Image (spheres, rainbow, N blue to C red):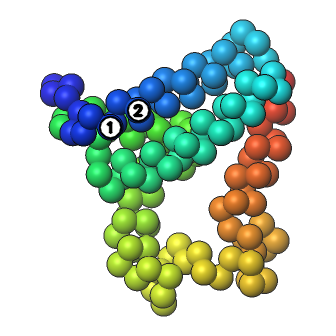
């Protein structure tokens, strides 16, 4: 298994993943919900979500097995299985890019379509997740 990263800049991604994982484990096992650590964890989780997006377009590792393990681990923080996200996002959204045929169209968010949470797109779901997560830890 080739443990080399494709780009040196991906070391920063690994550091973010390590910090996010540490914050998650520390709060889950040892500390409980600490307002400072929880806020830091939320920031890091959003950062990891951005890394997930980038990793799906340009995987970090030269090894296919390491990329798959990274996909699985990022799924923990992204909240949606990567194997299901790739066909929807990479092969559909980037092909149609918010036009007819795009199953993950985002341009309608905020225009009153669908259920309340769907009116405001991903940001409202992230906010709801942030509000409900302390109840998971307790």
Q: Quadrant of residue 113?
A: bottom right
Q: Could you tell me how many numbered marks the image carries?
A: 2
User: Residue lying furthest left in this view?
Assistant: 2
Q: Residues within 10 Å of mark 1 (few under 14, many from 20)?
A: few
Q: Which mark is residue 137?
A: none
Q: Residue furthest front?
A: 9
Q: Residue at x 45, y 47 (%)?
A: 52
Q: Could you tell me which quadrant the N terminus lies in? A: top left
Q: Quadrant of residue 31?
A: top right
| Quarter of the image where the C terminus is located | top right
Q: Report if residue 62 is visible in the image.
A: yes
Which element type, helix, strand or loop, lies under badge 2? helix
- Label 2, on which residue? 12
Q: Is residue 137 visible?
A: no
The image shows residue 3 at horizontal and vertical percentages of 21, 25
Classify 10 Å Cα crowding around label 2: few (below 14), some (14-19), many (20 and above).
few
Q: Is residue 44 above or below residue 3?
A: below
Q: Is there a contact, CB below 8 Å, between mark 2 and mark 1? A: yes
- Identify the residue under disc 1: 9
Specify the farthest residue to the top: 30
- Please state the horizontal and vertical placement of residue 19, each as a whole percent of the image: 54, 24
Please state the horizontal and vertical placement of residue 21, each as a whole percent of the image: 55, 24
Name the image quarter holding residue 38: top right
At numbered mark 1, what does the secondary structure look like: helix, strand or loop?
Answer: loop
Q: Is residue 19 left or right of residue 108?
A: left
Foreground of the two, 134 or 107: 107
Residue 128 left/right relative to 121: right
Q: Is residue 34 shown above or below 99?
A: above
Q: CA distance from mark 2 to mark 1?
A: 6 Å
Q: For the view shown, which residue lies furthest in the bottom direction?
A: 100
């Amino acid at each position: 298994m080739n443990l080399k990263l494709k780009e040196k800049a991906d070391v920063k991604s690994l550091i973010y993943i390590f910090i996010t994982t540490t914050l998650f484990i520390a709060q889950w096992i040892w500390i409980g919900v600490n307002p400072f650590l929880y806020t830091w964890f939320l920031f890091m989780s959003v950062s990891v979500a951005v890394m997930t997006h980038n990793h799906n377009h340009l995987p970090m590792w030269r090894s296919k097995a390491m990329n798959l393990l990274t996909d699985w681990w990022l799924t923990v923080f992204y909240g949606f299985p990567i194997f299901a996200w790739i066909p929807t996002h990479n092969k559909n959204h980037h092909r149609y890019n918010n036009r007819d045929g795009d199953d993950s169209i985002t341009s309608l968010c905020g225009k009153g379509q669908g259920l309340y949470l769907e009116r405001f797109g991903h940001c409202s779901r992230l906010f709801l997740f942030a509000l409900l997560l302390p109840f998971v830890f307790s």
